[in-house]
Image (cartoon, rainbow, N blue to C red):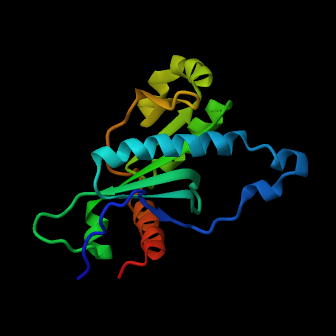
Amino acid sequence: MTKTPQLRDEPRVIRFGSQNTRRNLPCESAAKRGEANFLGQFERAYFASMRETSKSFARGREFTLSGYGRADVIWLAWRASAETADFSALSLQRRIKLTAIEAKLKDWRKGLTQASRYRHFSNRSILVLPPTTAAIAIKFLDTFTKIGVGLWAFDSVTGKIEKHSNPRMRGPLNAKAHAQAIQVIQRRLKLR
């Protein structure tokens, strides 16, 4: 029986070993890192705030699940069990809550499509946009709500996250896909 890992300065990072899709682009396009920089700034701001509210969580980038796309970021949180400090794969599977995050600079429709696919394996899915793009997407907030995808605006200058639509944690749309996602994560966390 292993104990739950203690919170450190940074959350536990899960490395999925995904292929860098930037290598598929021509040299001049591959050098543009606007979205990657935006995502990195969002991650720092978001996980700094999560450290204050959650004691047990981990994060991963470029999480791929065959048939459901590649989430820019996943965030895993789990409840500590009152009866045991067991951190086994089986124990974690019952308590884990998985959030999938997609970030886009401009094409919010494409981001919404991608984030909606993540609802199949995650407990919550969120699209993060810069404020100017979010101002356009907000006009379609009822669509985000109907399909269960959150809409957040992140200002990379101020580091402020504005949650226009924040879906609650709920069961994934596909229990089989969720179990498959948890298996991939467990392998990367090297749980017994």
Q: Is residue 146 left or right of residue 68?
A: left
Q: Position of residue 71 (x, y in %)?
A: 56, 52
The single residue placed furthest to the left in the displayed view is 83
Up/down of 71 relative to 132, above or below: below
The residue at the point 53 percent across, 27 percent down is 158
Residue 21 left/right relative to 122: right
Query: Splitting the image into 4 quarters, where does residue 90 fall?
Result: bottom left
Image spot of residue 75 (x, y percent):
43, 53
Instruction: Say whether residue 115 is visible.
Output: no
Question: Image height check: is 164 above or below 55?
Answer: above
The spot of residue 157 in percent (x, y) is 58, 28
**Does residue 45 sit above or below 65 in this rendering?**
above
- Is residue 124 visible in this depiction of the protein? yes
Q: Quadrant of the N terminus?
A: bottom left
**Left or right: 165, with 69 as reference point:** left
Which residue does the image show at 29% across and 68% down from the upper left?
92
Name the foreground residue: 64 vs 113. Answer: 64
- Total numbered badges shown on the rendered structure: 0
Q: Quadrant of residue 94?
A: bottom left
Q: Quarter of the image containing the C terminus?
A: bottom left
Residue at the spot 40% in from the left edge and 66% down from the top edge: 179
Q: Nearer the viewer, residue 186 or 4?
A: 4
Q: Position of residue 67 (x, y in %)?
A: 59, 59
Residue sitting at x 24%, y 75%: 3
